[in-house]
Amino acid sequence: MKRLMMATLLVLLIIQPTDLTKAEMKTSCEATQFKIVMKTTTDVKEKASAASKTLKTYKKNKELSASGRTGNWYKVCHSKKTAYIKMADAKEVFSSGEKVLLKKFDTRKGVNQVVSVTGKSMSDTKVAIQTYEKKQGEWRRALKKMEGVIGKNGFTKSKKEGDGKSPVGIYSFGTAFGSKTKPPGVKMNYRKTTKYDYWIDDRTSKDYNKWITYKGNPSSKWKSFERMNHELYRYGAVINYNTNPIIKGKGSAIFLHIWRGETKPTAGCTATAEKNVLSLLKWMDPAQKPHVVMGTNDSLKSAE
């Protein structure tokens, strides 16, 4: 009996490394994120370098799956290992909805970065956050797709103060902010919040939809306000909704900020995981005029 048990154990020890090797081989390539099409005869390289070894050559119009992009190189899977294709030799495949969305920015001079916040329906509170940047004259995906949440009552084309909805439309970004020190790599203007910083949502006040620093008792000055040193505002960015001109009652304090969780919507802001907020803040470059587009594919067709 002891001999049988030892023999069984020995077989398991021999088999296990083999199974692990197979598992490692299966997961050595990253998951597919999107498709690319060759614009010309293209070499697949072992590393992200023109001087690297050529692993394979594809003809024009060949479609491949990509797991992302590093610098000016797309990452693809070749022989179960990550390989690289020069960005200039390929174009990305976009859905009809993405094409409509990105076309809106072709006439917006200097806008080379776009954050897309899209839901499947106007009542959805869960959204997909996707980033795009114009590189070498073409739109390309930037960061990996993220999960996010919006207002507890979904999207609206006619936002009103206190409706719990997020506004459909295209907006620029204002300042980045946070209760923490400006993170390394953030290029946007960054404002560190204090206990004296408030965003005013009192529609009767001349300070409506403005960031105000005030050392007195805020309750005696405004009927309603938000404290900017809130825990969910450790990092964030102002979305320039209803800012020029400010229309009282049309909605205020629309931000990108940290979420409470993937099943917990906001009062009207867009929120996502802290690591995602940081990635977005570090990616956005004021010189590229980053904008956010918010809504569903249908609702955004008429958005300007």
Image (cartoon, rainbow, N blue to C red):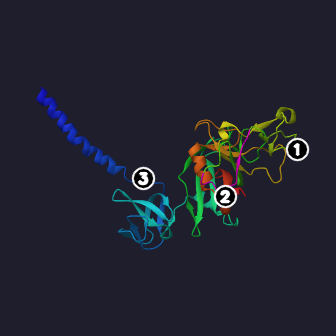
Distance of mark 2 from mark 1, alpha carbons? 29 Å
Helix, strand or loop at label 3? It is loop
Left or right of 158? Residue 26 is left
- Between the C-alphas of marks 3 and 2, the distance is 28 Å
Indicate left or right for 51 with 266 as reference: left
Q: Quadrant of the N terminus?
A: top left
Magenta segment: 184-194
Q: Earlier in the sequence, mark 3 or mark 1?
A: 3
The disc label shown at residue 11, or none: none
Residue 15 sits in which quadrant?
top left
Label 3 crowd (10 A; few <14 / some 14-19 / many >=20): some
Which residue matches tag 1? 206
In the picture shown, does residue 38 fall above or below 252? below
Q: Position of residue 274 (x, y in %)?
A: 59, 43
Q: Counting residues from the N terminus, which is met first, the one under dot 2 or under dot 1?
A: 1
Q: Residues within 10 Å of mark 1 (few under 14, many from 20)?
A: few
Q: Which mark is residue 290?
A: 2
